[in-house]
Image (cartoon, rainbow, N blue to C red):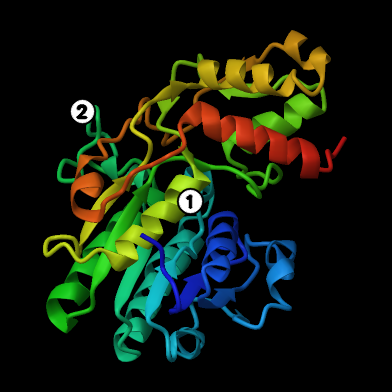
Amino acid sequence: MLIKDSKILVTGGAGFIGSNLIDELLKQGNFVRCLDNFATGKKENIEPFLSHENFEFIEGDIRDLEACKIATEGIEYVLHQAALGSVPRSINDPITSNEVNISGFLNMLVASRDANVKRFVYAASSSTYGDHPDLPKVEDNIGKPLSPYAVTKYVNELYAKVFADTYGLETIGLRYFNVFGRKQDPYGAYAAVIPKFVSALMRKEAPVINGDGTHSRDFTYIDNVIHANQVAALSTHPDAINTVYNVAFGENTSLNQLFDTLVEELSVFDSDIKNIKPVYGPERAGDVKHSLASIDKAATLLGYNPKFSFKEGIKDSVRWYWENLVVNS
């Protein structure tokens, strides 16, 4: 199920997930508008699109309601990816995370309602499960949030449901589980674990594993996320809308297993990497110990069928980093 010949807004389109979405949507013959303020997104991620006749870029902030209204004008589908991610970032600066992730989200809902968009699909988060102990994670069973970031993403779900019930706006939330893949930034204080490990290994440095390495995640390759956004936008199942879904592969991998897999794949390009061992550091505040998703609901109601396993995604990602990443020494 692919979106074709439609008018789509991707917020946060200069980011990792957003720019990959735009790339696919343009290939499928859509008009795509991007709204981004480059707070975390990168200009180089959208440069290949700037000359495309069906691409339009608006530099703006979702905290600015007027910018949101301009961005949603004439749009059929909103794929809302803009947010300040990272649990540690939210712990260090909860106010800005709240302003962007809650106030900005509310602005986008208002603008989408007023523009009569067909459907508002938004990036939710597996952090919403908080301290709920059960595995796999099932959408209706959540615990108490463990970080300001988790609070903001849960509030998004509450607001989306209110706008659906009160104003008739069709909304679907996608609870992403540790998305990874090409174009994910390895640098900065809040870099995700996979690109961070890859860049360290390419520099012949030992990555730091937070904790003893037994923490596990349901790592989800970017192409599975692109697929999820499209089926969420187009699903006609009567029970599909105004709810949330897990977006994952449905398998969990420990950080120790992740490290071993990255070493194995990178050693194909540089055999010296196989001799690198990790360094273990303290656990991070707000981290969930284990994460594993049930994807049954998304499969049933959306037709979500992730094609890329963790190992397949890692193989593709490592190849992309090796060919594209300029390693900072």
Q: Is 22 placed above or below 174 here?
A: below
At label 2, counting other C-alpha atoms closer than 10 Å, the crowd grade (few under 14, some 14-19, many 20 or more) is some
Viewer-proximal residue among 193 and 302:
302
Spot occupied by residue 90 in the image (x, y as percentages of width and height): 48, 51
Viewer-proximal residue among 21 and 179:
21
- What amino acid type should be assigned to the residue bearing mark 1? Ser
Q: Is 292 placed above or below 192 here?
A: above
- To which quarter of the image does residue 275 belong? top right
Q: Dot 1: what SS?
A: helix
Residue bearing mark 2 = 134
Residue 284 in view in this figure: yes
Could you tell me how far apart the alpha carbons at marks 2 and 1 are, in whole angstroms?
25 Å
Q: How many marks?
A: 2
Residue 164 disc label = none
Q: Give the mark, 2 or 1, whose residue is nearer the N terminus.
A: 1
- What amino acid type should be assigned to the residue bearing mark 2? Asp
Q: Dot 2: what SS?
A: loop
Residue bearing mark 1 = 90
Spot occupied by residue 84 in the image (x, y as percentages of width and height): 51, 58
Name the residue: 71% across, 76% down: 50
- To which quarter of the image does residue 268 belong? top right
Q: Is 179 placed above or below 59 here?
A: above
Q: Residue furthest right?
A: 329
At label 1, counting other C-alpha atoms closer than 10 Å, the crowd grade (few under 14, some 14-19, many 20 or more) is many
- Left or right, residue 85 beside residue 245: right
Marks 2 and 1: CB-CB under 8 Å? no
- To which quarter of the image does residue 244 belong? bottom left
Spot occupied by residue 266 in the image (x, y as percentages of width and height): 72, 23
